[in-house]
Image (cartoon, grey):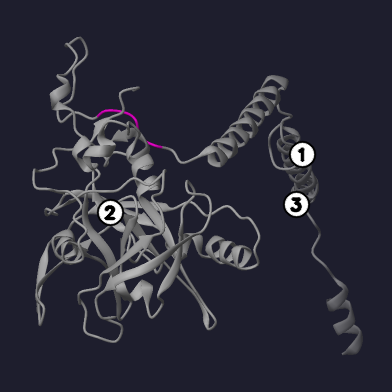
Amino acid sequence: MSDQSTNQASQQPPESEGGTEVRRRAAWIAPVVAVTLAAILLIVLLIPGVLRYPAAPEEVVVAALKDSNQSLREEIRRLGTVEREGVCVYEGELYPLAVEEGEAAPDPSDKIDLLPPTPSRTKPDPEALPEESQASFSGSMDDLLRGGTVLILRMEEQGLGSGTGFFVSKTHIATNSHVVGDASELIVTNDLIGKPLKARVVSKSPDPTGMRLPQPDFALLELEAPVASAIPLSLSSAARTQDVYASGYPGFFVQGEVVAYAKAISQGKEAKPPQGVVTNGIVTTIQTAQRPTGALDFIPHTASLSPGNSGGPLVDVCGRVVGINTFVTQSDEGDLVLHGDYALSSKNLADFLTANNVAPPFVSTACNGATKLASE
């Protein structure tokens, strides 16, 4: 049995010649396909600009990029110079209707004023000055505010207080009562005066500190002698939506300079007074509060104020004082911070000054807008 089984297991059917030929063909197909795919991949990788072999930039492209970078560097340098020289001011003109090509130039009367005129490029109304100054003054609004506004220093043992005031005559200065405080004598100056001057307190309303605002908040100072560079300002009434300027010495901008100046003169050293700051805005409305002394008009406006502006003039674009900057309010409403800037009206200030025998001109005519300097 065992021999028979062995013989049966060892017997295999014979292979045909056709089957052997198929096997030989299949053996070389796989290497050929692999070599072909590898060759295609290598060719793709060697194409310029593909994957690891980017095309080299042409010389003209490199030169153009270098020129562009150099132009950008020069423009950055130029802008840095402009920034140091001053603030950009719009000097163009806008008209309500488009001007089609080929048509005549638009009528100048149709021009739209984009922004309020800048103080340095406008001329105040002659009526903004007392009669004795009208003939001699021919400067800009900025010149008027520089000569008419003063820094007030209250130098006491317990510390330094500062505020703003403005000339209502060559020897008299109007300011706020809370700027004066309990002092009987103060220091006043500006960059045109160039030196500290002593001023005595002639009169003041009760200090409103701690009282419900607004309150009468006026004070009158007197100098020992007339100041040659002083430009007394006239008064006028405010009007809703009119453009205004606030002139003064806000601590937000000049606190460091004010403190350094006060320290220098307290040590007997010569020092140059800081220059005042001018902000602009509009009168938003005119409100009235009833107080024991009578009706008190006050003016919310958008010319930015900060501590140090108190006592300074709020002037219209004709150069007339329409209010005396007095207080600010601020409140937090969740994520919203509400801020308000206020002046007391020139009408109430005029009543206070008249009661103390000082009567600056009060101009009742409307301000028809600023005019450009004659040199422009």
Identify the disc placed on residue 42: 1
Disc 2 to disc 1, C-alpha distance: 92 Å
The residue to which callout 2 is attached is 168
135 or 302: which is nearer to us?
Answer: 135
- Tell me what residue is drawn at x 25 percent, y 70 percent: 218
- Horizontally, residue 67 falls left or right of residue 203, namely right
Q: Residues within 10 Å of mark 3 (few under 14, many from 20)?
A: few
Identify the disc placed on residue 19: 3
- Tell me what residue is drawn at x 68 percent, y 38 percent: 50
Please tell me which of labels 2 and 1 falls first in the chain: 1
Please tell me which of labels 2 and 3 falls first in the chain: 3
Helix, strand or loop: magenta stretch:
loop
Number of the front mark, 2 or 3: 2
Q: Is residue 105 above or below residue 77?
A: above
Identify the disc placed on residue 211: none
Contact check, label 2 and label 1, Cβ < 8 Å: no
Give percent across and percent down for residue 152. 43, 64
